[in-house]
Image: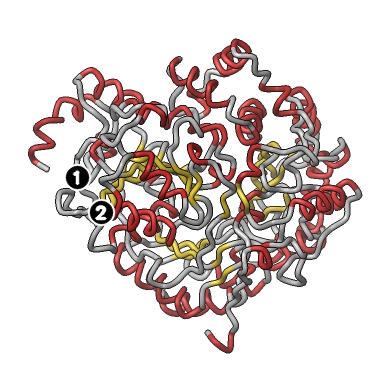
Amino acid sequence: MSDFLDEFALILASCEKPSRYIGDEFLSANKDFNSAQVRVCFVFPDKYEIGISNFGHKILYHIVNSSDYYMADRAYAPDKDFLRLLSKNGKLLYALESKKPLNLFDFLGFALQYEMSYTTILKLLDSSNIPLFTSQRTNAHPIVFAGGPCAYNPAPLSDFIDLFLIGDGEEVLIEVLDKYKIIKNQSRDKILNELSLIEGVYCPKFQKKTTKRIFIPTKESHPVSSPISHFVSVHDRATVEIRRGCGRLCRFCQSAHTNLPVRERKMNDIISLACDYVRNTGYDEYSLLSLSSNDHTNIEEIIQKLNIHFANSGINVSLPSQRADRFSLKLAKLMQHEKKTTVTIAPEAGSQRMRDVINKNLTQEQILNAVLSCVQSGWDKIKLYFIIGLPFEDDSDVVAIADLIKTINQNCKSRGLKIPLITCSISVFVPKPHTPFCWHGQNKISQIEHKKQLLLSKKSEIKNAKLNFHSPKVSQLEAYFTRAGEEAGRLIYELYKNNSYLDSWEENIDFELYYKTARSIGIDIEKEACKNLNPDDYTPWEIIDTGVNKTWLINEYNKAKLAQSTIPCEVKCSNCGVCFNLKTAKVYDNKVNS
């Protein structure tokens, strides 16, 4: 560490927040680089405070470092000032723990969480002296792999990523490292071809239909400690994943359709993991993580037992966005055991018709009951998630968002309850691959602006509500890249050459650059984002098999047109095909076996 500080003293002294770049965090693994048989660096293409909070990275970091043969290190996207200083001083981007340049690792693994990080990935490769194009790499360069939500359409990055890991990464990554350990002295093409034969591995150079990997989470695969940031990170708390997958099958949600089937952890394992994680790290908050946390079979009993364990300690529980139909008064009281935080509920749409269109399986009465339960329990701050620009939406559906808030206020007033402060986070629909809405085009920016103004015109009637809108311009770029083919690779490359970097932060996006560059190479971003696709046509992401039948997705799309719901698979099998096609099954935490 002292040699590193001596070498980088001037750079660290000249940048903002140097603690992002020094490593040596409490609870970091710090395994020996030279003695490891295979070395992996997980690279998160966003700032340190975002990446160090990512739980997927924590799982894979734990899995690799649990092996005697392998070591895992970490790197994050430096802010622009630090990147300039590295270049000015002739230094390469390095991993935090070993301080080794990224080009010395056997594997670099990128997290594909967000389409707007694509140009950042290219800049990070360039700053590591690694050829951007897979065709230009040799045995002297790391194998570059990527996984995460955006990997379900690998086409836009297929020129730059050697391997995509599809689905759950716990087992497939170790299988890749095990195979590589045996064949690492062979030619690069031979290595890539051999690794592409592993189930769940897609290699653009040796294209074949690739089926996602499914892992049944175990207690051993879950970390109970992780590196603690030197300064506050975005999610500065212990995290326990209690459930993987979601059977609600909202038609806009990619995570629900790509993470099937539902797999729940046992209650006793969850309690043990939460207690161990908090004890090891010293966090004063723990999160019970899932796509739909209060759908866990034993959620109330889990929180009740953890409340007893952490009684009078000041340690607080948090749940992500919750299902209104599963939010009870008992759960509300359990969650405010130590202190009250903002409760987040996701109605997604204001009108019942639109909730049926998107298959939310949620009534206004259930939403009201959830909010009133919170207010009765003492919460005065509620956060609601909505989406505008949804398929088959009209103006009345948008105005219904304001009407729903007015109804909440009226019900609070009629019951003598304090009207809560409501923050509405309003995003723009983005059609995602592998969902029933993947073929439906996005609204034009002008249409979104119209709908935004409709809501703002109602602001005087809902003065207790703050309306936060996601940028329609950013959403349009997301919609283009998420459904794009390999031609998007040229746009990503040209944007990178024009210094596009850290565009996951809106203040960094040069929108004119995006549209001008796209036009120069014959791409109309708005046209591609907004056009409807023919479900009978082949799409770039169909090379990835999630197990869901395409005919089922088309049927769900047609049911949406008629505002018809599908019963959640927790209640009744929806016959999507996943369990049959992938020879798997749902896993629930039966109370008898807990």
The outermost residue toward the bottom is 592
Residue 25 at what x, y percent from top left? 24, 50
Comparing labels 1 and 2, the label whose residue is closer to the camera: 2
Q: Dividing the picture into quarters, in which one does residue 591 lie?
A: bottom right
The spot of residue 123 in percent (x, y) is 38, 26
Mark 1 is surrounded, within 10 Å at the Cα level, by few (under 14), some (14 to 19) or many (20 or more) other residues, namely many
Residue 429 lies, with reference to residue 212, above or below; the image says: above
Q: Is 553 situated left or right of 434 in this image? A: right
Residue 71 in sight from this viewpoint: yes
Task: List the residue tagged with mark 1.
Answer: 98
Q: Name the side, left or right, on which 454 lies relative to 318.
A: right
Determine the secondary structure under disc 1: loop
Toward the viewer: 107 or 48?
Answer: 107
Residue beneath the point at 86% across and 48% down: 558
The amino acid beneath tag 2 is Met
Place residue 401 in its image quadrant. top right
Q: Amino acid at mark 1?
A: Ser
Q: Image quarter for residue 512?
A: top right
Give the percent coordinates (x, y) of residue 357.
83, 50
Query: Number of marks in the image?
Result: 2
Residue holding disc 2: 71
SS category of the residue bearing label 2? strand
* The one of 548 and 435 positioned closer to us in this rendering: 548
CB of mark 1 within 8 Å of CB of mark 2? Answer: yes
